[in-house]
Amino acid sequence: MNLAALKDNLKSVDTSSLVDKVEANLVELLQERKLKVGDSIPKELELAELLGVSRTVIREALLRLRTMGLIESKKKKGAVITSPDLFGIMSKSMNPHILDQETLKEIFEIRLVLEIGMADFIFQRVKKEDIEELRKIVSNEPPATQYHLFNIEHEIAFHGKLYEITGNNTMKKFQKMLLPVFDYVHNSGLLKKQPMLKTFVSHKGLIDTIETGSPELFRNAMRNHLENHFARLFD
């Protein structure tokens, strides 16, 4: 969209939604100019003239972009484009107590899918010392964990290490946000109750599969490891 079109777009907008529209048009303008991380954006006065609105409106729209982590202020450079901390922004709203039940359940499902899907990354990047650390983690678990749903401490320690082994820092950050939701969903009664839990692949069994198996075997083992969770979703 060119500048003339941006201005025409703004003319038909009522005052209550003006800042919303300017915010969207600012993002379009920055994309149009092909600005990248570290580049300075135009000054408030220039933006006000380009978009045909007051500096007050521009200032409010820029504040929103700062809040989203899209821009930040730098000495001698003014406002510059930044790479937003997506998970930092998401974590502010990833509170299980303020999310509706359907969203909580879907987040729970995302975590199960991620852990089954990480097999190839683990097998490509796992090291001997990773296996040793996993076994050390398992040695501190009570024997009953093979037959019961894991508590949040065991999940953080063991599954957190699996995410670390993948080498994907973004996935690891996502996992840290998902675990509190996972624990909340498990304890909140959102999932179906089971009178008896079946034996499933333990953390130790998963380690054995990583050490001597294959990505396909690990996917199957992780699916079995999480079987009771899936049963509570679909049975």
Image (tube, grey):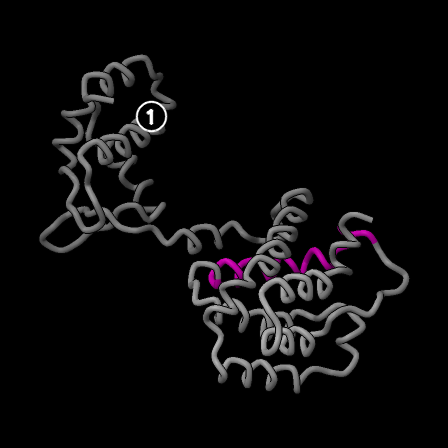
- Asked if residue 219 is positioned above or below residue 212 in the image, the reply reads above
Residue that sits furthest to the right in the current view: 195
Residue drawn 30% across and 51% down? 83
Residue 150 on image: x %, y %: 71, 70
Residue 216 on image: x %, y %: 62, 62
> What is the magenta range?
172-192
Prevailing secondary structure class for the magenta stretch in the rendered image: helix
Per the image, the residue denoted by label 1 is: 21
Residue drawn 24% across and 20% down? 6
- Does 175 appear in magenta? yes
Residue 72 on image: x %, y %: 24, 50
Viewer-closest of 223 and 145: 223
Which quadrant holds residue 212?
A: bottom right
Which quadrant holds residue 169?
A: bottom left
Residue 44 on image: x %, y %: 16, 35
Kind of residue at disc 1: Lys
- Asked if residue 93 is positioned above or below residue 155 in the image, the reply reads above
Horizontal side, residue 70 vs residue 145: left or right? left
- Does 168 appear in magenta? no
Viewer-closest of 231 and 69: 231
Element marked by disc 1 = helix
Residue drawn 22% across and 49% down? 37
